[in-house]
Structure formats: C-alpha cells, structure tokens
Image (spheres, rainbow, N blue to C red):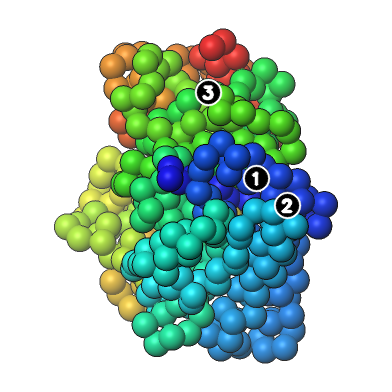
Amino acid sequence: MPLLVMKFGGTSVADLSRIKNAAAKVKTEVERGYDVIVIVSAMSGKTNELVGWVESTSPLYDAREYDAVVSSGENVTAGLMALTLQEMDIPARSWQGWQVPIQTTSAHAAARFVDIPRANMDAKFAEGFKVAVVAGFQGVSPEGRITTLGRGGSDTTAVAFAAAFGAERCDIYTDVDGVYTTDPRISPKARKLDKIAFEEMLELASLGAKVLQTRSVELAMRYKVRLRVLSSFEDTDETSGTLVCDEDEIMESKVVSGVAYSRDEAKMTLIRVADRPGVASAIFGPLAEAGVNVDMIVQNISETAAGHSGATTDMTFSVPVNQVARARKAMEEARATGSISYDELVEDTDVAKVSVVGIGMRSQVGVAARMFAALAAENVNIKVIATSEIKISVLIDRKYMELAVQALHDAFELEKA
C-alpha cells in the first residue's frame, strides 16, 4: 500500500475535540487507500508545563530524567489519537519511541537520529493495521534511556519516518494554511505559496520563519522528502497548503520568494582588534565554545591607528539578543588571557534582521540594488549586510523592521503569483 506520513502539532491536538478533528483527516487518507504513520506533538502548552515541573523540582536537573518527564506529553497524545481512530473503526495503535525503536544519540534534550528500523512497524501493517500513531520528539539512546530531540523535534520525527519508510509525502498539519511570502500579520499583501524549494524553505526557517523547524527541512532536503504544510482547521484536499519540494518540481521561480525577519538580534563590535593571522579564530573560537550562535560577520579594512604599533581592525558580528551577556563574557575572558586584544566592545541590542530569499537570485542580477533602493526610499539605514547565493540579509534598527518588510514585499511584487 502507498504510505503517507501526517504530523499534527500541539495546537492541532490541543484538546479532545481537536484530536477528533485530526483523526478525521487521518481517516480520509486511509479511505483514499493509504497506510498512514501519524506523528503527534504534546497537547498545546503541555510541554511547557512539564518543563516547568522539572525546573521547579530540580533546578540543576538530571537531563535523563528531564527527558523521561518531558517526553510523556507526546505519549498521552499518541494514545488518545489511537483510541479516537479505533472509535472510528480504523485499525490503529500507538507507538512510543522505544517501541519502534527510534534509535538516537545519547545527547539528552538534543538527541539526533541514528536509525529507524522498519521491522516492528512493517509487521503490524502486514497484520492489517492501517495507522501507526507515533509519539514525536523522542527516541531511545544506546543505553536504553528515553531521549528527546529538542524543541520542534516532532517535525524532524515526521520527516525521518517519511525518509525511512519511503513515504509518498509528509504532511505537516499546523495552525496556518501554508507558507507565505512573509508574515501576514506584518504585510496584509502576503500571499500563500503553492510550492517552495527546499533551499528557500531552509533559508526562511533559519532566518526566523516559524512554520517549519530548521532541522526538519535539512533532513527533507537531504533525503528528498516532499513536505506539505497545511492547516488542521480547514477542509483540505491534495492541492491544499504549500508543497516544499525539489527545485526541479518548480517550473519557474520568482527572483525572490519571500521576506523573512528576526526581531531579537544584537550587533556587537570589537573596536581596534589587533589585525594578525589567526585573529578571527581567536575571536570566534571562544564564542563557539561558549555556545554563542554567531550569524553575520563584517571586518573593516585594516588601518594603523595612533598609539598602536601594528595594524588594527574593527570586527562586527550579530548574535541573538539573549546571548549578548554570554558573548561579552567570552570576549572579556579571551582578552584577559591575552589571546585577543581590543580597545572596546560596543553592543547594540536594538536591531533586527530582514532578509530576502529566492533561488531565482542565482540567475538574476540587480537584486541587491533593488533591495537597497527600496530601503533607502523609506530612509531605513543598513548597519550590516550578509549575502549567500539565494539570500541577502541586512541588520537595521528594530523600529524600522515592519516598514522594511512591507517595503521589500512591495518592491519585489510578492503579492503577485
């Protein structure tokens, strides 16, 4: 039988009525002739509640017990979904991670997949079961302990099962009806995309779009798993939502497919760093060791300043605003040990990142000029620029973020199909 993977997020299974609604969508696919693997998240708000209980009980908690507690939310949903399907006369059973078994690394709360053996689940499908309801977000370590995959891990679970079982498609049901050209809350002109390439979706996800978890898109791109994003709360058919697929499936790409933003950014600048071989490593090595996620990097042209015996440069980089203190500490410690020298560390915690993304940039010139002209027309000053083959990102003052998103959406006429 053809196989389909369907994933339902927390808002889609928030209570018993929503679980019943999701189960009805699964029944529709079974009636179309599919065997179905359903991946479920914990009911909305449950994971936060469980995390809170752990932190209240043990501030310096054992990560293995954290996983044992936090993974239970998905187990509850899986059991309730299986029961609901059985009440609809659909042969279904629930699976916890260790029962599959979903084999992962031992990195508790941040585990990664190692293997998903098919034998146990294939045997149940051969017996006549039509639906396997799998608890997302979890697996089992080589030591036999429950592991979790980190936030958004149920998306990754769904893609991993689609890859392992050769599914025809992986449908991600959520509270939005697809992927939009930008956030509709910022630009009323935002348009739902029928299709988007893996690379574009990966860039949008990493740049702040919250529709899909970045790791899930990476995995889908690697194994060519066709993803479809669609709403749990609307009637859907095989043309609904947005298909995330290989570039070859898209006949003609627009130059820019979407505008993404990240509100919580900070810009940090090391003033007059000694410019010598290895200085970049001396700066970004300690930041990496401190777990700081560095994004955009700009180094100024070297100059010899008064009072300095050698050439110096300024080094600017962006980090999430909640990692500024950690980055500052790493730089101060590096200076104290003599591995780097600088005059001053300047922080700007009131910036945002705005990006345009599109695989059409590969074959079109003038995209940067068009972007910068649109921002200039709105008197939006650019602080830092970073580019890749299919992306241009800028750091700007946070107060101009929404204006910039709207201006760029208009400039590239993204409201037009």
Give the amino acid type for the residue marked by disc 3 in the picture.
Answer: Asp
Q: Secondary structure at mark 3?
A: loop
Side (left or right) of 192 relative to 213: right
Q: Residue at x 69, y 81 (%)?
A: 55
At x 55%, y 69%, the residue is 95
Q: Can residue 354 be seen in the rendering of this structure?
A: no
Q: Earlier in the sequence, mark 1 or mark 2?
A: 1
Picture quadrant where residue 68 is located: bottom right
Q: Is residue 226 visible?
A: yes
Q: How far is the residue under mark 3 from the one under mark 2?
A: 32 Å
**Outermost residue, left direction?**
277
Kindly identify which residue carries mark 1: 27
Q: Earlier in the sequence, mark 3 or mark 1?
A: 1
- The residue type indicated by label 1 comes to Lys
Q: Nearer the viewer, residue 298 or 14?
A: 14
Label 1, residues with CA under 10 Å away: few <14, some 14-19, many ≥20: some
Nearer-the-camera pick, 258 or 340: 258
The residue at which mark 2 appears reads as 88
Q: Residue at x 61, y 73 (%)?
A: 71
Give the residue number, with chain letter if any, for mark 3: 194
**SS type, badge 1:** helix
**In the rendered image, which quarter is residue 361 located in?**
top left
Cα–Cα span, label 1 and label 2: 8 Å
Q: Position of residue 209 (x, y in %)?
A: 56, 40
Q: Earlier in the sequence, mark 3 or mark 2?
A: 2
Q: Quadrant of the N terminus?
A: top left
Between disc 3 and disc 2, the foreground one is 2
In the image, residue 120 above or below residue 337: above
- Judge whether 34 appears above or below 249 on screen: below
